[in-house]
Image (spheres, rainbow, N blue to C red):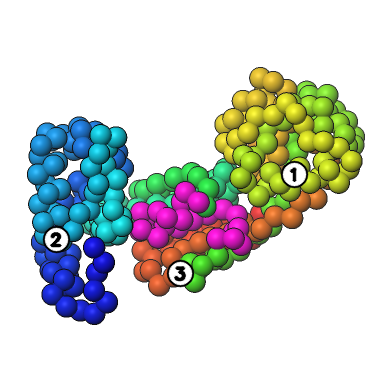
Amino acid sequence: MKLPATKGPAMAQIDRVLRSNLKLRHLQMLVALDQFRHLGRAAEFLSVTQPAVSKTLAEIESMFGLPLFERSTRGTEPTAAGASVVRFARSVLAGYDRTRDEIAAEASGASGRTSVGAMVSATPVLLAQAVQRLKARSHRTTVLIEEGDLARLLPKLRLGELDLFVGRLEPGYASPDLETEPLYDDPMVAVARPGHALARRRAVQWADLAGQPCVMPPPWASLRVKLEQQFFAHGLHPPADIVESASFLSQITFLHQRGAVAFMARTVARHFAQQGMLAVLRLPVQVALPPVGLITLRGQRVTPVTGLLVESLREVGKTA
């Protein structure tokens, strides 16, 4: 059903439902149903019966006068209207969680809570040092960190589930609703386990890597294309023995277990090389990468604790 373009009875009904009729339990059920796409699994997650979920969904759809989920033997799928209501529910619940945490922190004498989405390239050095500075100012502040890439984390930032994103500022994700702040450039380097034959060489060539096991970024990552172009530019085919992963844990695992070579941000590589976990290879990796920086939602009020973390990130960024 298409909503009217002007504010008529249908629009007034939707306003009334969104402002007054929807309860917190309704929003929680909608989010759970969207997450699990199955009445039974949503019911199990919410610790209620499946008939109770069905009854609540029917109640909400009756309020709107619209179907919100399509039921089938394969599960449930949100309609176009349902997807919009689910986005609204997620946004409201994120605001609820933030307000609850702030009030609880104030009541307990703590200093608040902030939620950060971070790429692997920013976590071990930039974010870790910034959190350390924040904790020195307010040790009872809680920092929730969720790792991932821009495609996964930006929707959470837009819904208010995250206060801040820290990572590479990929230009393809620029948008008028986002504010970006570059902090520093962080080029790519090649790494291997300590004691690897290539780690002992004074100079490493791309031809030396072509026959090695490698951990490469996933095929859809822009860095993957740029790295493969480096091999082609030197008249080589990219390595055939590869594992595809953007996970730092996977990189470290295959460096040690398979003697693989991997690529990571220079600040991260140097940090873990100092701890004896890997060796940075003497290979020029001439790959153009966007800077590491911050992304916030334009116009969103930054909480005091998030503001302190941003200040700490800027301080660390100046020394990176």
Q: Which residue is mark 2?
A: 65
Q: Residues within 10 Å of mark 1 (few under 14, many from 20)?
A: some
Q: Earlier in the sequence, mark 2 or mark 1?
A: 2
Question: Label 2: how many residues lie within 10 Å, few (<14), some (14-19) or many (20+)?
Answer: some
Q: Quadrant of the C terminus?
A: bottom right
Q: CA distance from mark 2 to mark 1?
A: 53 Å
Q: Pick the residue in front: 273 or 284.
A: 284
At label 1, which amino acid type do we have?
A: Leu
Identity of the amino acid at label 2?
Gly
Q: Picture quarter containing residue 157?
A: bottom left
Residue at image coords 24%, 63% = 1
Q: Earlier in the sequence, mark 3 or mark 2?
A: 2
How far is disc 3 from disc 1 in space, using C-alphas? 31 Å
The magenta stretch spans which residues? 151-173
Mark 3 is on which residue type? Asp
> From what the image shows, is residue 54 above or below residue 183?
above
Location of mark 3 (residue) = 177
**Please, which residue is most extreme toward the top here?**
257
Please indicate whether residue 32 sits to the left or right of residue 197 in the image: left
In the image, what residue occupies the spot 11% across and 56% down? Answer: 62
Report x, y in % for residue 49.
Answer: 12, 34
The residue under the point 19% across, 46% down is 29
Q: Secondary structure at mark 1?
A: helix
Q: Secondary structure at mark 2?
A: loop
- Neighbourhood count class around disc 3 (C-alpha, 10 Å): few under 14, some 14–19, many 20 upward: few
Q: Is residue 18 left or right of residue 212?
A: left
Q: Is residue 213 magenta?
A: no
Disc 1: which residue: 227
Query: Residue 191's x, y, as percent?
Result: 74, 35
Of tags 2 and 1, the one toward the viewer is: 2
